[in-house]
Image (spheres, rainbow, N blue to C red):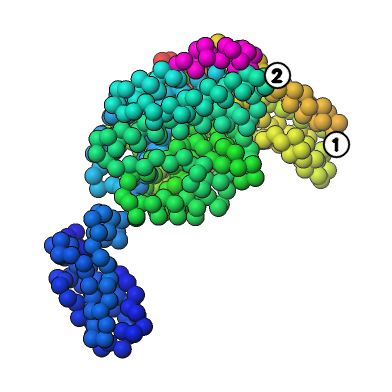
Amino acid sequence: MANTMQFCGVIPKQSLHCPTLSWQRLEFGACVSSSSRFCISVKRSCRDRGGLRVSCEGARIDVIERKESESQVLGENEKQLTCVMKFGGSSVSSAERMREVAELILSFPYERPVIVLSAMGKTTNKLLLAGETAVSCGVTNVSCIDELSFIQELHHRTADELGVERSIIEYHLEQLEQLLKGIAMMKELTPRTRDYLVSFGECMSTRLFAAYLNKIGVKARQYDAFDIGFITTDDFTNADILEATYPAVAKRLHGDWISDLAIPIVTGFLGKGWRSCAITTLGRGGSDLTATTIGKALGLREIQVWKDVDGVLTCDPNIYQRAEPVPYLTFDEAAELAYFGAQVLHPQSMRPAREGDIPVRVKNSYNPNAPGTLITRSRDMTKAVLTSIVLKRNVTMLDIVSTRMLGQFGFLAKVFSIFEDLGISVDVVATSEVSISLTLDPSKLWSRELIQQASYLQLILSLVTSFKQELDHVVEELEKIAVVNLLQHRSIISLIGNVQRSSLILEKAFHVLRRNGVNVQMISQGASKVNISLIVNDSESEQCVRALHAAFFESDLSNLDAEGSPENTSASD
Ligand SMILES: Nc1ncnc2c1ncn2[C@@H]1O[C@H](COP(=O)(O)OP(=O)(O)O)[C@@H](O)[C@H]1O
Ligand SMILES: N[C@@H](CC(=O)OP(=O)(O)O)C(=O)O
C-alpha cells in the first residue's frame, strides 16, 4: 500500500472494555486490534487534516499529533534505512568526485542509505608521511612539511569548489598541525599517535561531504565512528571490532534516523579502544569493515562497496591488465581472496556480512552501470573452476626440520607455541613426517603501498628493521628444537575457486608453471576448500600470475577436461 501510512499504539487500560473502536476523521485502509494494541494503516490524504485520533466509547485517545517533520508521516517500513554505501579514497579524491558520488547516491531514490567514506585520495599515506617527517624535522619546521601543506591545500580547495565553508574543517586542520608539533617535540610516533594522526583524513572527508549534501538540499548528518559506538580492541593500527559495537551503532544510527531523516555520513576505518578510549584504526582499507559492521548492526538489505574498478577482478589489474570482473563470489571466496592479499577488500570485512547474511555488492563509482560483483553465502558452483588469482609478495618462508619429529607427539604444538608467544601470525602451512614448511604474514609491515614506494626510505627502513629483528628472534627460538632454514623474497599465489575440482586446477596450474620454467616450493590446500596456495620466488611471481590467468581465463577449459592441458598457456601483457 504505497499510498498509506501505518500507525501502531497501545490502548490505555481505561478503554480496554470498549467493544469496538471507532475511528474518527480518518479514512483507513486496514485495521488490526487486539485487547490492548492496535495497528491501522491510513490513507495518505488524511495526513493534512490535523491530529489523528482514535476514540472509543469510554475515552478518547490521542494516537499521534501531526507534526511538520516528515518522519512523523512516513510509515514504519518507509522509516527503515535500507543499505550501506561505502566510498573509498579513490571515489572521493576531489570536489568533482564528491559531486559525482552525491549524484550517484541520489540516483537511487528508493534507497535510504548509510554512507561510509574513507579519507580523500591518498590522504592517509600523506598523513603517515607527515608524521614520520615530524619525528625528526624539529618543531619550528612542522608548518613547512610538504605533506601537511598538501593536505591543507587539498581540503581547502575541496571546500571552496564544493561551495561549503572552510570553517567545517578548519578546526581539524589546526589540530592536525598541533599534533605534528607534538610529535616533533616528542621525537616519536607511537602506534596510538599514528591512529589519531590518520583519523583526521576520514574526519575531514565526511564533514565536507555532509556539508555539501546539506548545501544542495539533501539533509545529511556527519558521524565520527568513534563517537557512535564503534568499540574496538586497543590494538592500535589494526584493531578488532568488539561485539558491543553492533547494538550501540544500531541504537544511535536508527534512533537518530527515525527522529530526523538525515542521511548518516560515517567515518570509515576508525573506532575507539575499549580500555584506552583513544581513537583506533581497523587496519589499512578498514572502511570496508566499517561498512559491513553497519550493515550487520542495522540488519540492512545490502552492503555496497564502491571502488575504482568494475568489481572484484580475476586478478590484480596492476599485474595483468586483462583481468576481468568476477560476477559472483561467496563470502568464503571473498574472505580468502582478501586475506591472501587482494587489495580490493579488507581481510576482515566479510565476517560481519557473513554473520548477518547480508549480500555485499562491489561496484565501480567511475562506471556505475557495470554490474560489479555480488558476494553472498552461496552460489551455483556447477560450472565454476577458478574464480580469481591472488598474489601476496615479499613473504618469508621457514623450513623447520627435525628428525626428532618422527613419530613424536607435541612437536607441532611446540613450534606453534613459539609463534604464539612472539605474536606472529602464520599464513600457509605444509608438513611432512620430519619437517614443517610455513610462511609468515608480512602484513605486520603497516602499509604495503608505502613499502613499495622507494622515496619513503626512512619509514621503510624502520619497518624492515623491526621485521628483521622479529625474524631473528623466531629463528633463535626455533633453533632450540629443530634445524631452521629461512627463505625470504617468496610469494604466495592463491588460486581461489572450486576446490571440488582441485585435480583439474592443479593439473593445469602445474602444466603452466612447468612451461614457464617455475619450480613450486610449497603447496597447500586450505580447509576452507576454496583456496590452493603455491609458493614461488618473488622474482617469478608476476610472470606466473599472467601465465595462469591466460590459461584459466583466456582459453577454453572444456578441452582441458577432455584432452588434457591446452597448448598456449604462457602470457604476457
Ligand atoms: N582482484 C582484484 N580485483 C579488483 N581490484 C584489485 C584486485 N587486486 C588488487 N586490486 C586493486 O584494488 C584497488 C581497489 O581497492 P582500494 O584501493 O582499497 O579501493 P578504495 O580505496 O576505493 O576502497 C583497485 O584499484 C585495484 O588496483
Ligand atoms: N583511509 C584508510 C581507510 C580505507 O579504507 O581507505 P580506502 O577505502 O581508500 O582503501 C586507508 O587508506 O587505509
Disc 2 packing (10 Å; few <14; some 14–19; many ≥20): few
**Residue bearing mark 2:** 465
- Secondary structure beneath label 2: helix
Q: Identify the magenta region.
A: 132-150
Residue 522 on the magenta segment: no
**Given this view, does label 2 or label 1 mark the residue nearer the observer?**
2
111 and 344: which is toward the camera: 111
Magenta highlight on residue 139: yes
Residue under the point 23% across and 62% down: 66
Residue that badge 1 annotates: 404
Residue located 58% across and 44% down the image: 232
Q: Is residue 404 left or right of residue 138?
A: right
Determine the image quadrant of residue 368. Answer: top left
Q: Is residue 461 above or below residue 93?
A: above
The quadrant in which the C terminus is found is: top left
Residue 374: x %, y % from top left: 37, 42
Task: Give how far across and how far down residue 14 sits, in percent.
Answer: 34, 85
- The quarter of the picture where residue 308 lies is top left
The residue drawn where x is 48% and y is 46% is 228
